[in-house]
Image: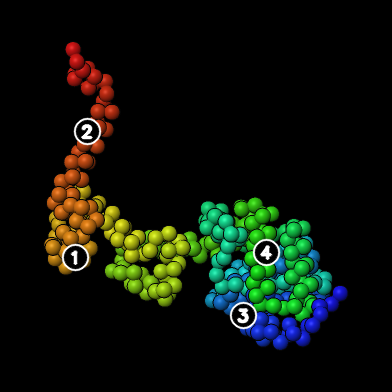
Amino acid sequence: MKPVNIERHLGCDCYAGNNKTSAYKEVAMKPEQKEEIKSGDKTLLIFVDSSDTRYSITNDLDPTSTDINETRNAPFGMLVESNNTLSITLGCEGTLQIFMFDRLSHLCSGYTFNNLRKYAPITMVHRTIEIYEPLKLSLMTIHRFYQDGLQCVEIMEQKLKEVFFVLAGYYKPEVLGELLAPLLRKEVDFKEFVIMNHYRAKSVQDLADMRRIDIRKFNKLFKETFNVPPYTWMLDRKAEMIEERLADPTVPFKDIMEEFRFSSPSHFTVFCRRQFNKTPSQHRKELVREEAEKRAAERRANNIHYYRTNYSDK
């Protein structure tokens, strides 16, 4: 059965041939045909329906390094992150189904990629997945639409969400964590960057410049990663570090002001009032007293027999 009124579809602005933002394409391959697919600035989710498939993935930013060089003997799926080239050779005739996207989206309405962060490996891995029957059925439908000329950009974007819905529904989170490791690892890298460098930055703009990304993109990525705006987070970290210095009575206020770039004693006092609801002197006294009480409690706990013998009621 073929589509009806295909001319109407081909003339639509959403037809992939008329629209450069298509999220899906296919590559039909013959046995032993070698194909190179560059991801560019997109992330590619690729499904291969052939057996005896040989492939390698090379980082375009460092062409001398081959990250992956493997052979698979059954249909499978893989993820190729941005700025990489996939070189692939099929052992028998087959089709590559390629989804392209430039940002993380929902696996389904109530299960985001954030749920998978804890399953992301600490070291980078590359994982291929078996194509289970539910995923196979979804991919077959997409393939049929594409082959019949119903290459609608909007529908293919919805189909990408459907694929992620199937992945979330039928694959263990540990498997998805490894499959999506390159994307999840990027977020881990961003978090590590912020934690390691925030104290060197005078402002959020400084930190964005150090990361070499636009301030709007930095703010969005920061909020997604830390769940708070960057200014609020940096202010809280600054307060924590200042509190550590105030807790040490041997550190002069002048040194703290110089270290944290306060322009004057009044500027330092205003900051402390806003963050701690006390002046620097008041907060230091409180911190020193709390530390003394804590040490006294520890001594009593460690020498409970002595205190019971000498200070208990007769």
Mark 4 touching mark 3, by CB under 8 A?
A: no
- Foreground disc of the pair 4, 2: 4
Q: For mark 4, what is the residue?
A: 163
**Residue placed furthest toward the right:** 1
Which label sits in the foreground, 1 or 3? 3
For the C terminus, the image quarter is top left
What residue did someone put label 3 on?
Answer: 21
Within-10-Å neighbours for mark 4: few <14, some 14–19, many 20+: many
The residue tagged 1 is: 262
Is the Cβ of the residue at disc 1 closer than 8 Å to that at disc 4? no
Amino acid type, callout 1: Phe
Q: Residues within 10 Å of mark 1 (few under 14, many from 20)?
A: some
Residue shown at 39%/60% (left/top)? 228
Mark 4 or mark 3: whose residue is earlier in sequence: 3
State which tag comes first along the sequence, 1 or 3: 3
Compute the Cα span from label 4 to label 3.
Answer: 18 Å
Marks 4/2 in contact by CB < 8 Å: the verdict is no
Front residue of 203/5: it is: 5
The 10 Å Cα crowd at callout 3, few under 14, some 14 to 19, many 20 or more, is some
Residue 227: percent from the left, percent from the top? 43, 59
Q: Please tell me which residue is depicted at 73% across the width and 72% down the height of the picture.
A: 96
| Residue type highlighted by circle 3 | Thr
Q: Assign a secondary structure to mark 3.
A: loop
Query: Farthest residue in the top direction?
Result: 314
- Counting residues from the start of the chain, the first of labels 1 and 4 encountered is 4
